[in-house]
Amino acid sequence: MAVNVAAVVVLVLFYLAILAVGLLAAYKVKSKTFKGEQIGELETSLVAGRDLKTSVGIFTMIATTVGGGFINGTAEEVARAGLVWTLAPLGIFIGLNLGGAVYAKKMRSARYLTMLDPFQVHHGNLVTFLIYSASLVGDLLWTASILNALGLFMCCVLFS
């Protein structure tokens, strides 16, 4: 099993480009205001100073949702059951659109930083902890699926 040198070079260049874009973006961050109030460093980091363009927000949500596990799982389901029975992409699309249309403006005006902030305000710490715990388990499993997809990608591309 020989290593594909060209693939390694392209992969390293790709990750260096991602690092360069991240460092450039961090360097260019300026102090901002939202509705006349100074925005803190935490708010600037977590919600981009509440100054994210719609197109950037859409692509950010797509990138957050569509990972290697999503792509591999969708391809497997299409091959197994056919395109008609692959409902996850449609459900995620509808969910993201409904969430954006119904909740985005309310959450922005209330200056929430996470999706859990409204639950903490209305239901307290215990309910928020329970929701967070379920989300944490889901995120750990999602991370495992992404790492599995990355391993499959590395095996196919680097050692082909």
Image: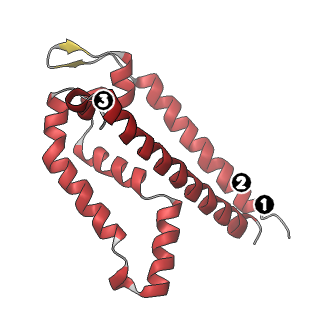
Residue at left 75%, top 72%? 160
Dividing the picture into quarters, in which one does residue 5 lie?
Answer: bottom right
Amino acid at the residue labelled 3 = Leu
Residue 115 seen from this side: yes
Residue 89 in picture, x, y percent from top left: 34, 68
Nearer to us in this view, 155 or 160: 155
Instruction: Indicate which disc, 2 or 3, sits on the residue closer to the N terminus.
Output: 2
Residue 51 seen from this side: no
Q: CA distance from mark 2 to mark 3?
A: 38 Å
Q: Secondary structure at mark 2?
A: helix
Is 13 on the left or on the right of 41, as rendered? Answer: right
- Of discs 1 and 3, which sits in the foreground? 3
Location of residue 110 with respect to 137 vertically, above or below: above
Q: Name the residue that disc number 2 marks.
A: 9
Q: How many marks?
A: 3
Residue at left 46%, top 79%? 77
Q: Name the residue that disc number 3 marks.
A: 113
